[in-house]
Image (spheres, helix red, strand yellow):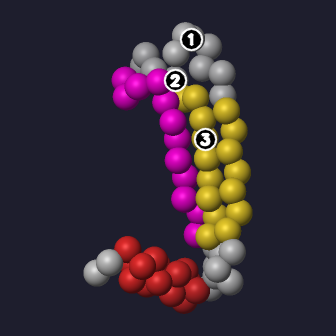
Amino acid sequence: MNPVEVAERFRAFIAQLGQPLACLDIETTGSHTERDRITEIGIVTLHPDGSQSNWSCLIHPGCAI
């Protein structure tokens, strides 16, 4: 399956759901849960009509990056 076919199937899946699907992305300074910090949060919401909305927020981690 090529990338275009994957995208078409994914769009059809979201349309069949009949409600938005939100994808969350979190960026951090590393992977150590006690030492590293979140630097950015992003959400892409995919709607059944094929549209999408985006939201993101930069976060000061309180440490040097």
Q: Is residue 29 visible?
A: yes
- The residue located at (55%, 52%) in the rendering is 24
Q: Which residue is mark 1?
A: 63
Check if mark 1's residue and mark 2's residue have beta carbons within 8 Å: yes
Q: Reading the chain from its start, which is encountered first: label 3 or label 1?
A: 3
The 10 Å Cα crowd at callout 2, few under 14, some 14 to 19, many 20 or more, is some
Asked whether disc 3 touches disc 1, contact meaning CB atoms under 8 Å apart, the reply is no
- The circle drawn on residue 41 is 3
Q: Residue at x 58, y 29 (%)?
A: 39
Mark 1 crowdedness (10 Å alpha carbons): few <14, some 14-19, many ≥20: few
Is 60 located above or below residue 50 in the figure? above
SS for callout 2 = loop
Residue span colored magenta: 21-33
Secondary structure category for the residue under label 1: loop
Q: Pick the residue in front: 7 or 14.
A: 7
**In the picture shown, does residue 29 fall above or below 9?**
above
In three-dimensional space, the C-alpha distance between marks 3 and 1, rounded to whole angstroms, equals: 17 Å
Image location of residue 13, percent across then percent down: 49, 84
Looking at the picture, how far across and down is residue 7, in whole percent?
45, 77
Relative vertical location of residue 37 with respect to residue 15 in this rendering, above or below: above
Number of numbered discs visible in the structure rendering: 3
Question: Residue 23 location, x and y as percent?
Answer: 54, 59
Task: Name the residue tied to disc 2.
Answer: 37
Residue 58 drawn in magenta: no
Quarter of the image that includes the N terminus: bottom left
Going by the numbered disc 2, the residue's amino acid type is Arg
Q: Position of residue 52 (x, y in %)?
A: 67, 68
Residue located 62% across and 13% down the image: 62
Viewer-closest of 38 and 4: 4
Judge whether 19 appears above or below 29 on screen: below
Q: What distance separates the C-alpha of mark 1 from that of mark 2?
A: 8 Å
